[in-house]
Image (spheres, rainbow, N blue to C red):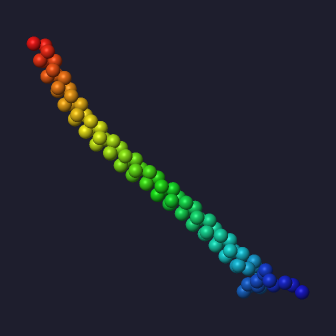
Amino acid sequence: MESTKNTKVTGDGSKSILKRPVALTLGLLLLVLSGYSLHRHQTKKKAQFAYEETKRALSMMAIHFNHGLKKMNHLNQFEIAKQKIYKY
């Protein structure tokens, strides 16, 4: 007696492998590809977040640096005025 558990007779009379293992393989492939896609998306999201945080930090540093430069300019003007006074 021949087992028909893993084979199927097609319309032309030939036997073929059931579609079940193929469907399982395709499902597994879809799952793996979805996981990979999700991993890439999360990696891009983390990189974008790091980029935005770096931009924010550098912007804050630039603001404070410019504020410090203004203060240094006032000190420089004071030093120039002091040298003019002591020069005479």
In this view, which residue lies farthest toward the top? 88
Q: Looking at the image, which is closer to me, 45 or 30? A: 45
Left or right, residue 8 beside residue 64: right
Residue 12: image quadrant is bottom right
| Residue at 58% across, 64% down | 35
Look at the picture and state if 16 lies above or below 51: below
- Residue beneath the point at 73% across and 84% down: 10
Q: Residue at x 15, y 20 (%)?
A: 82
Q: Quadrant of the N terminus?
A: bottom right
Which quadrant does the C terminus fall into?
top left
Seen from this angle, which residue lies furthest right?
Answer: 1
How far from the left and from the top, in percent, is residue 87?
13, 13
Indicate whether 4 appears above or below 42: below
The residue lying at 54 percent from left, 63 percent from top is 38
Measured as percent of width and height from the top left, residue 36 is found at 58, 61
In the image shown, does 5 or 14 lie closer to the viewer?
Answer: 5
In this rendered view, identify the residue nearer to me: 88 or 5: 88
Q: Which residue appears farthest toward the left when viewing the image? A: 88
- How many discs appear? 0
Relative to 73, 44 lies left or right: right
